[in-house]
Amino acid sequence: MNFIQIADVHLGAAPEAGRRDDGQREKEIWDSFYKVIDICEEKQIDLLLIAGDLFHRQPLLRELKEINYHFGKLSRTKVVLIAGNHDYIRKDSRYLQIAWSENVYPLFETTLHRAVIEELDLAVYGFSYDRREIREARYDEAYAPRDMKYEILLAHGGDETHIPIKKAKLKALGYDYVALGHIHKPQMLLKDYAAFSGSLEPLDQNETGRHGFLLGEITEKGTQIRFVPFAKRQYIHLHLTVDIEMTHGALRGKIKEEIEQNGTAELYKIILEGQRDPEIVYDIEDLDYYGNIVEILDHTVPAYHYEQLYERNKENLLGRLIGHFMECEPESIEYQAMCEGVSAILAAMEERS
Ligand SMILES: [Mn+2]
């Protein structure tokens, strides 16, 4: 039996995508989800597991009808899903108001239930969130009964306020596989036994690295899982070091070149470091050549010759300021504050002269 595991798709979310974005990022998340369904059909996958937070917020009825239509077209794949902390089952949840296609097995109860799929000799266990937070370690005792050939646990959580999970407890449950959602970074928690697929598409600038889904196979010999990179885009953090020689134009060219090397379709956070020419102020907007930068952090400091300045200004405010902070670490807030203070005083002195 083979399966695809996705989680944390967060349909309805609109992640930051830079100046170039015109709402397309929100649509890309939907597109990726539908593409996974297409793959299930093409590859004749037996089982699609959705480990919670399919939606970023409460789903709308028309959205679920659309999704159910796509599920219903699958000729082979069975779909099992639970709701997570984002799309949790409220009393009036639209999840409960859909007549799901017969190949869809929702586990929307709030206690452990199972979906039995006779054709696959399989039972999938799980429950859904009925609120935003669950602090109890509710998977700790969710043992596999071992009365079917294959038994899978579909689970959502793993942090302090969303069902804490301990590896040793999970291992002792005795499933063939535990499909996990909630943690957005793909992670093999226990090799070929328990894994987070991570979010299908990265959802904010700190979700760097590859995103996608898990492809698994369970046979009599055991379980095998592998990660399939699939996301349309990734967030990349670029650290660039400037020096005193670097002009604004040169920096702009350098950023453009780095982005071309890493891919112009990706989304970037740029962190500028090093010592810049004290005369230069970088025009942050102007550095975003492709419109795919979500943030630029300017951590550069002006390259003053502080010791010389100190010697010449011992008797005045400027000298006292430098004398006080000169020994601080260049990365520290104190040092940065000194740099800015020095710039301000120098600018004021220049104006007066
Ligand atoms: Mn979650």
Image: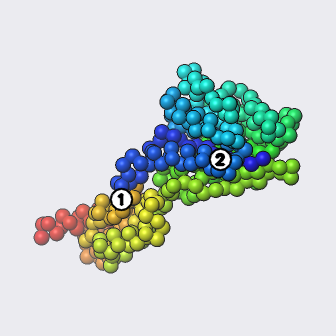
Q: Circle 1 sits on which residue? A: 291
Identity, as a three-letter code, of the amino acid under mark 2: Cys
Of the 4 image quadrants, the one containing the C terminus is bottom left
| Colour theme | rainbow
Q: Is 349 left, or right, of 239 in this rendering?
A: left
**Of pointers 1 and 2, the one earlier in the residue sequence:** 2
How many discs mark residues in the rendered view? 2
Residue 307: numbered disc: none
Q: Which residue does the image show at 65% across and 28% down from the upper left?
A: 108
Quarter assignment of residue 339: bottom left
User: Disc 1 vs disc 2: which is toward the camera?
Assistant: 2
Q: Is 53 left, or right, of 267 in this rendering?
A: right
Q: Is 245 left, or right, of 210 in this rendering?
A: left
The 10 Å Cα crowd at callout 2, few under 14, some 14 to 19, many 20 or more, is: many
Q: Circle 2 sits on which residue? A: 40
| Residue 55 x %, y % | 54, 37
The one of 72 and 217 positioned closer to us in this rendering: 72
| Residue 329 x %, y % | 45, 66
Quarter assignment of residue 307: bottom left
Identity, as a three-letter code, of the amino acid under mark 1: Gly
Q: Is mark 2 within 8 Å of ligand 1?
A: no
Q: Is 310 left, or right, of 266 in this rendering?
A: left
